[in-house]
Image (spheres, coloured by chain):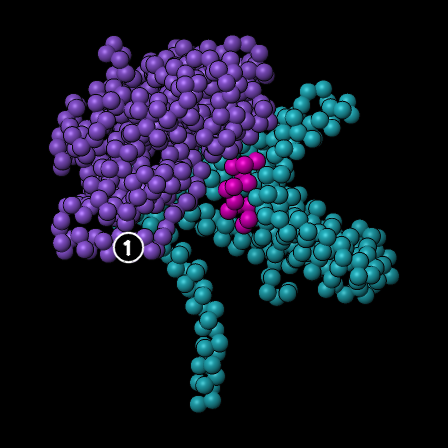
Amino acid sequence: MLRSKDTILAWIQAAPLAVVLLGFLVAPIIMIVIVSFWGATEYSIYPDFQFDNYAFLLTSPVTYTVFFNTFKYALITWAFTLTIGFTVAYFLAFELRSLKWQIALFLICTIPFWTSNIIRMISWIPFLGRNGIANQTLISWGVIDEPLDWLLFSDFSVILAFVHLYTLFMVVPIFNSMMRIDRSLIEAARDSGATGFQTLWNVIIPLCKPGIMIGTIFVVTLVMGDFITVRFMSGSQRANVGRLISNDISLLQYPSASATAVVLLCTVLLVIAILLRFVDIRKEL
Amino acid sequence: MTTISKVRYSRRSLLKAGGAMAAASALPAPMVWGQETKNIVLRQFGTGVSNLNEVAQKVKEDLGITLEMTALDTDSVTQRAATQPDSFDIADIEYFVCKKVWPTGNLQAMDTAKIDNYDKIVGIFRDGKLTPESEIAQGTAPHSVGFVDGPGGTDFADNESGWMTLIPTIYNADTLGIRPDLIGRPIESWTELLNPEFKGKASILDISSIGIMDMAMVCEAMGEITYGDKGNMTREEIDKTIAIFTEAKKAGQFRAFWKSFDESVNLMASGEVVIQSMWSPAITAVRSRGIPCVYQPLKEGYRSWGGGIGLSSSLSGMELDAAYEYINWYLSGWVGGFLMRQGYYSAVPETSKAFMSENEWGYWFEGKEATDTITSPFGDALAEAGEIRDGGSFNDRMGAVACWNSVMDENQYMVRKWNEFISA
């Protein structure tokens, strides 16, 4: 009797979150999956059950180019954000002695987040442009004679913007993991004769794995789902999966957009599943 | 263009209109309608180009009709006209959109006998000819989708049948915009867009239906492709066109592509791009920053577009009469003058003349030298005394249209090829 009462109570406690997730996460995804089988004309969509959208998607060379680009952006951005994020977090966690300074500098890291994503991204455009500050400065220093065109509207500018936008998502979880490392472990490593690098490699990094993994999931999903950064920073000259979807939507091709979204979702889930094979976040948290 | 939502919504006026309509249907007395128009509300939607609040204010002053305006981008306009017939009374759409939307039956044909200035509407919208000698351009020419056989007609008529689908309101001829100060030599042909001289300094718009036409103008000018109809290409023509531009893209010809009006202005003003497809108000915006920019007339001609207003098929009775009154007011000159002073053209230019100064008329319409500073209706100085309009007079510009904006039969195929081009 008592047990069933507990069960009911547990259900009630879980219900609000379950309802929210069902209504705002599961239901929309089911809708997208359903619509991805529909048909479309120039200006309308009609219920149907056809595989045309998927058939076209999976046989078109555009899809493969675009998925390749998406992975390329994700991988390069990940490498940079991890290196920078780990370094910053290491500095905050181990180099600074006082908690006051740690908190102060950590807050400074978050300042850029007080402005909108789009503004932080667009402000690179006048900076990197042909007549922008970067080129003018380099020319006045005599480093270059001609403005560098590849600074803007290129893969370089896209990745630069991604790294700028998303590094903090690496810093925060890694910093969090580092703060939980028992300092006596590091002392023990040093006492046992480990060099600084050996301590880093054999003690700190393994213990930071959950943080690294959470940061990785953030960065990879954000980059893979993005479309606006790629559009602005490449001057519409590069495409990733997000742009493919947004193009379809603006042309009223919702079923085709849904099909692409489903494939993207599966891909991202697959990537995360693989990542989770390396680290059991739940166990280590 | 940009997505701006400017819904003017007054609950009170709606309630009043509802009451008036109920009264009118209970007591059908035609003579009361003179006073009743004060309470009539018409819901209009269209692109930001012509859905201007100034028009709604003026129509309220002159006729007492309340016009609720909604400005959307081109794609959303098409979508709404086709899928939400009950959400509007008046559709302000482009002629090529009309080709898609008319078959849905959401619009009703208009009786030209009720249009006061019908006889003065320029020939482009009637028999397709600006002057009796003109040749009709390729693409979806407005007159080809401008008439139907009768009030309930579903097929487009090839003559002036007396039943119009859209009443033309605004149109213009588009070409390439250039930075004369950074180019430093005359530009005369569309081929210059792919001239390696401008490597990394050219741009084209990333709106497939319009971009493909600009591409076609270039390919034809280069002598690479001869099109049957640029406005309705075959798959083979689309393939060849995209192939030429993909090659240019891979060779680094383009600095960027633009999708919104503001992007085109910034690319040009910052000097990232010196030659690109552009729209006339964007040229104005660059110039108003004090940067030289020319809407360069080219020997192969212009790519033109036109819009008009259509009536929802659910309009009837007093509201329908009010809509006709609105249309007649639209063509009577004030709106025409307002639009022409921004560089567009009015369907009945001669009525607009009364609403423009002699200097403005001479500059915008006749292609004469400005005798004084030309300002836009919003107060920006657009030209100084002694300057002439790029491309010259109305007849010079509209007489040199090579192609109209259009929808191709192979539209879906084209869009797919366009995606390949962008991701190449």
Q: Residue A154, position in %: x, y?
A: 58, 31
Judging from the image, what secondary structure is the residue with disc 1 in? Answer: helix
Q: Is residue A176 above or below residue B274?
A: below
Q: Residue B345, position in %: x, y?
A: 36, 24
User: Which range of residues does the magenta coloring cover?
Assistant: A221-233
Pointer 1 chain: B
- Horizontal side of A111 relative to A222 (left or right) equals right
Residue matched to label 1: B16
Viewer-closest of B80 and A18? B80
Residue B54 seen from this side: yes
Quadrant of image for the N terminus of chain A: bottom left
- Horizontal side of A284 relative to B400 (left or right) equals right
At label 1, the amino acid type is: Lys
Q: In this view, which residue lies farthest toward the bottom?
A: A1
Which one of the lettered chains is coloured purple? B
Q: Quadrant of residue A279?
A: bottom right
Chain A: colour as depicted: cyan
Residue B306 highlighted magenta (yes or no)? no
